[in-house]
Image (spheres, helix red, strand yellow):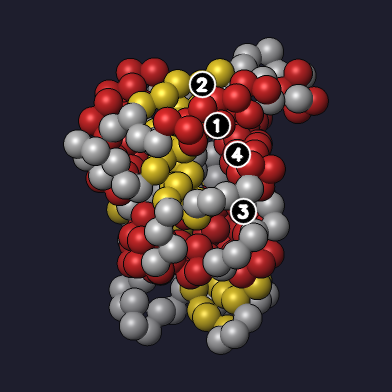
Amino acid sequence: MGELENNNEKKTILIVDDEKPIVEILIYNLQKEGYNTLEANDGVTAVDIALEKKPDLILLDIMLPRMDGLTVCKKIRHTLPNVPILMLSAKDEEIDKILGLELGADDYVTKPFSVRELMARIKANLRKVEANNLVADSKNEKDSVENEIRIGDVILNLDKFEVRVDGKVIDLTLREFEVLKYLATQPGQVVTREILLEKVWGYEYYGDIRTVDVTVRRIREKIEKDTSNPKIIITKRGVGYYIAT
């Protein structure tokens, strides 16, 4: 509880799952760590609670009654672009992982999961949001021109967490922005997927590093003129990615 004891405001986590034993286990462990919890047992209720209560993080099962978790993720992400969403599922199929992340999920955990690992991921995602908020607050009085990174026709405004391509604002999720920013701060330098997971997601990843590939693919779809022949984010096969100089 050490990390939360120094925080004046408890974080609230919304648990969305129709399996009562799992919900009870999560509530017990989250409250033990000092978090407030909300719960929803179906997709429709999950959307309603998320939009009304605006939790700090959401644990979201894929298989839900009334509305599946992937649809829930998409609806919540549209209104709450920066709240971390961790997908939970008994399925271990690659398509589910990729689709969930493409709809805006920040992470994916397969059931049965380690409670210790899940708690570590929750803390890492919350720390990342807090760190980004602190950075934004510390820069809010500075000249934004001094806090821009230019990559050809692409401009990253680090104060506004905004990306423009040919002068047009591009809608990136916070995670996508952070990946692009991390690569852009060291142009020409190859960054491994493992390093991106550590620096952007905030922890050493336990499993599928395809999370990074999916995120990079989404960024390319938004900023590259031709995704089949990218000119901004370049792949170093078998290693990672770098920004073209």
The residue shown at (44%, 47%) is 87
Q: Nearer the viewer, residue 240 or 24?
A: 24
- Residue bearing the label numbered 4: 122
Quarter of the rendering occupied by the N terminus: top right
* Mark 1 vs mark 4: in front: 1
Tell me whether the residue at label 4 lies in contact with that at label 2, contact meaning CB atoms closer than 8 angstroms.
Answer: no
- Precedes in sequence: disc 1 or disc 2: 1
Alpha-carbon span between mark 3 and mark 4? 14 Å
Tell me whether the residue at label 1 lies in contact with that at label 2, contact meaning CB atoms closer than 8 angstroms.
Answer: yes
Q: Farthest residue in the top direction?
A: 8
- Residue bearing the label numbered 2: 37
Helix, strand, or loop for circle 2? strand
* Mark 1 vs mark 2: in front: 1
Which amino acid, by three-letter code, is at mark 3? Val
Alpha-carbon span between mark 1 and mark 3? 25 Å
Q: Nearer the viewer, residue 212 or 227?
A: 212
- Residue bearing the label numbered 3: 200
Helix, strand, or loop for circle 1? helix
Tell me whether the residue at label 1 lies in contact with that at label 3, contact meaning CB atoms closer than 8 angstroms.
Answer: no
Q: Farthest residue in the left direction?
A: 66
Q: Please indicate whether residue 230 sits to the left or right of residue 27 in the image.
A: left
Residue 163, above or below 220: above
Helix, strand, or loop for circle 4? helix
- Residue bearing the label numbered 1: 26
* Mark 1 vs mark 3: in front: 1
Q: Nearer the viewer, residue 100 or 174?
A: 100
- Precedes in sequence: disc 4 or disc 2: 2
Alpha-carbon span between mark 4 and mark 2? 13 Å
Residue 144, above or below 237: above
